[in-house]
């Protein structure tokens, strides 16, 4: 199974407080933000890591080269900043006919369980699996997506992008695993009217509406999606909570 890491974002909302505008190379807790995703991919046993780059691509390529902890890295250029689904689409030839693990280069997870998620995906022969976390502050779910699911099987019925009123404390992340056939649904994914691009939850929803089995999996014990200086402050508090001495 390959790993696909989306790292083409500019990080414009960080520019006022951060000298380096390429947010995936922002150093947090001693390492570039992107490295957390690479470590998760490596620990989960990815056969190859495909990184989609765009803005200041040379910083990422020069920073990580063609190998990470023994796993080959392949780079794909996303020429236009047209969102996550477009980033996946341009990487489809590099993924080939394999199933793949999706990770976003602007996310940090504490105590992640990617290897266990891969095991669940394979044993249950799922079409897709979405990594989720339990979010105490429901307002934070507005930054990613919410789920409506069966509470016993965790089969997902609906995904809600940036919900104004999250229906539960389950928060979706960009850490997912898909069958290669997820790319077949890209052309059917509607364009989000407010953002002008196709969104990941809408892509997954197309597969769900077609009867595919997509479930959730508790991927970690803490999670932050880094987009603003305020998110960095949240990450610092979260890191202190998990690693402060008792």
Image (cartoon, rainbow, N blue to C red):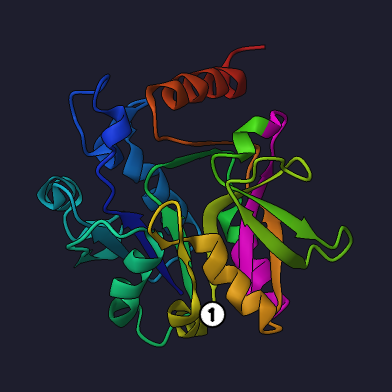
Mark 1, Cα crowd under 10 Å, few <14 / some 14-19 / many 20+, is some
Is 134 drawn above or below residue 173 in the view shown? Answer: above
Place of residue 198 in the rendered image (x, y in percent of width and height, measured from the top left): 43, 64
Viewed as shown, does residue 123 lie left or right of 236?
Answer: right
State yes or no: residue 56 in magenta.
no
* Label 1: which secondary element: loop
Note whether residue 151 is visible. yes
State yes or no: residue 135 in magenta.
yes
Tell me the quarter of the picture where residue 238 sits: top right
**Front-lying residue, 113 or 23:** 23
Residue at (78, 45) in percent of width and height = 167
Is 11 drawn above or below residue 94 in the view shown? Answer: above
Note whether residue 126 is visible. no
Q: Which residues are magenta?
A: 117-138
Residue, disc 1: 179
Is 32 drawn above or below residue 6 in the view shown? Answer: above
Residue at (26, 53) in percent of width and height = 8
Tell me the quarter of the picture where residue 76 sits: bottom left
Residue at (43, 66) in percent of width and height = 46
**Front-lying residue, 73 or 161:** 161
Viewed as shown, does residue 105 lie left or right of 94?
Answer: right
Judged from this view, the residue extending furthest toward the top is: 246
Viewed as shown, does residue 212 lie left or right of 144?
Answer: right
The quadrant the C terminus occupies is top right
**Front-lying residue, 2 or 146:** 146
Place of residue 121 in the rendered image (x, y in percent of width and height, measured from the top left): 65, 71
Place of residue 39 in the rendered image (x, y in percent of width and height, measured from the top left): 41, 49
């Amino acid at each position: 199974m390959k790993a696909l890491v989306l790292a083409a974002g500019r990080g414009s909302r960080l520019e006022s407080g951060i000298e380096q505008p390429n947010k995936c190379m922002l150093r947090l807790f001693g390492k570039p933000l992107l490295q957390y995703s690479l470590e998760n991919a490596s620990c989960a046993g990815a056969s190859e890591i495909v990184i989609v780059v765009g803005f200041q691509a040379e910083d990422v390529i020069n920073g990580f080269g063609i190998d990470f902890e023994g796993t080959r890295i392949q780079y794909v250029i996303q020429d236009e900043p047209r969102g996550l689904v477009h980033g996946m689409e341009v990487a489809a030839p590099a993924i080939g006919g394999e199933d793949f693990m999706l990770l976003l280069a602007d996310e940090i997870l504490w105590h992640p369980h990617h290897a266990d998620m891969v095991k669940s995906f394979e044993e249950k022969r799922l079409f897709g699996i979405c990594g989720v976390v339990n979010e105490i502050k429901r307002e934070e779910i507005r930054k990613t997506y919410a789920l409506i699911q069966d509470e016993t099987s965790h089969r997902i019925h609906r995904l809600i992008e940036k919900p104004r009123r999250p229906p539960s404390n389950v928060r979706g992340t960009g850490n997912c695993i898909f069958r290669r056939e997820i790319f077949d649904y890209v052309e059917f994914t509607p364009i989000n009217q407010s953002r002008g691009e196709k969104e990941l939850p809408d892509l997954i929803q197309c597969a769900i509406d077609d009867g595919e089995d997509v479930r959730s999996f508790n991927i970690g014990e803490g999670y932050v999606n880094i987009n603003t200086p305020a998110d960095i402050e949240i990450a610092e508090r979260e890191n202190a909570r998990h690693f402060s001495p008792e």
